[in-house]
Image (spheres, rainbow, N blue to C red):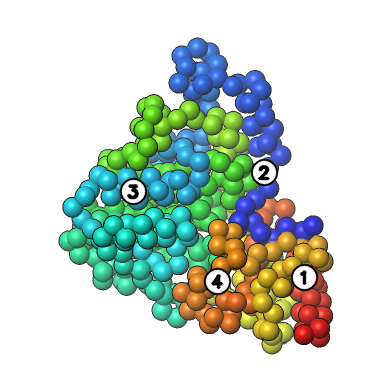
Amino acid sequence: MEYFDNAASTKVLEDAAKAALDVMVNRYGNASSLHSLGLESNEILSSCRKEIAKFYLRKANEIIFTSGATESSNIAIFGAVKRNRKKKKIITSSVEHKATENCLNHLEQKGYEIVRIKPRENIFYAKDFIDCVDNNTLMISIMHVNNENGLILPVEDIARMAKAINEGILVHVDAAQSFLKLPLNLDNIDLLSASGHKVNAPKGIGFLFAKKGVKISPISYGGGQEFLLRPGTQATALIKALEVAVKYHVGKRDQLEKKYRELKEIFVESLKKNERICFNFNENCIPSIVNISVKGIRSQVFLQALEEKGFLVSSGAACSKNKDNKTLINLGYSKERADTAIRISFGVETTKDSVLGLIDAINYVEDSVLKYC
């Protein structure tokens, strides 16, 4: 099987898996304990914090380990709301991941005003977000890269412009699809969520960046771990694996970006003459995600046919399976395009040969399915 669903989850690096096993078997102390094994575990936490902070040019004590981006976003959003109960307005985009969307839906039911900004001609503009800012605005919560088609949202401009209006407005960024892929200046960003399993670390580990001085309240209680914001014994084995993955991606970032751009170009050039194929992305999208629609073939039919040929792709976000793809519609694409869309996402093991094989499979499946229909 050739795997093209890296936007949903990635294969754990062999070195990361080995590092996790070593910690589980040999360095299994509780990081809160004061004996040698505990101190060694605490050093694992410290080392990984430094590596993540280094990528964003921030300080290690601004990194809080969590189980992933979903938990991080819950802590960021509900922690901010709990801290400041007076302001009732949150601004977001119309295409957020469920981790953010469902938090905000819950708050909306509780009486909060949630403003969802839509794109114009498949592009988001910072001014559209800023025009909605007023004295009642608590937070702007927005993704950096859309998980469906890789669209890059102008989070730096939004954050900078928001802070120029009111420094007290909190800016939260969901960086699940951009961490280690795109640089991001966090000078005007207060909170940021990310997951390890998107970057070849295990599932169950992620982090929340919380800028020094930003005040949010805990939403769960226990020990004093992770600066009181995420209580519970830290998963040091997973954290060590995340550190290995971070170092790998930092060292290979330029190389991987170049590879993804080349693979995307091969993919597009090979299929653009096919009039039945539509490309659901533009030049403002990252190169590792490609979203296409094949006229007349529903997504589920197409991906199952591709799997039979040995290629694993997605019909949309993994968290929204068996549901209509509203994200593409909210991005400005037609319902027909959304109903026939498949997402292809490249990873560290994706090769030119595997992409060429996928292209052949798409052409074969399209021809055979349409003949059958």
Q: Choose mark 2 or mark 4, whichever is in front.
A: 4
Picture residue at 45% right of the left edge, 45% below the top: 71
Per the image, the residue denoted by label 4 is: 324
Mark 2 in CB contact with mark 4 (< 8 angstroms): no
Kindly state the secondary structure of the residue where label 4 is placed: loop
Residue 309, quarter of picture = bottom right
Residue 242, quarter of picture = top right
Position of residue 260 relative to residue 131, above or below, is above
Q: Quadrant of the N terminus?
A: bottom right
- Looking at numbered disc 4 in the image, what kind of residue is underneath it? Asp
Mark 4 vs mark 1: which is more N-terminal? 1
Per the image, the residue denoted by label 1 is: 305
Picture residue at 45% right of the left edge, 21% below the top: 32
- Looking at numbered disc 1 in the image, what kind of residue is underneath it? Ala
Residue 78, label in figure: 3
Mark 3 vs mark 2: which is more N-terminal? 2
Mark 3 vs mark 4: which is more N-terminal? 3
Residue 12, label in figure: 2
Q: CA distance from mark 3 to mark 2?
A: 31 Å
Q: CA distance from mark 3 to mark 4?
A: 27 Å
**Front position in the image: 282 or 6:** 6
Mark 1 vs mark 3: which is more N-terminal? 3
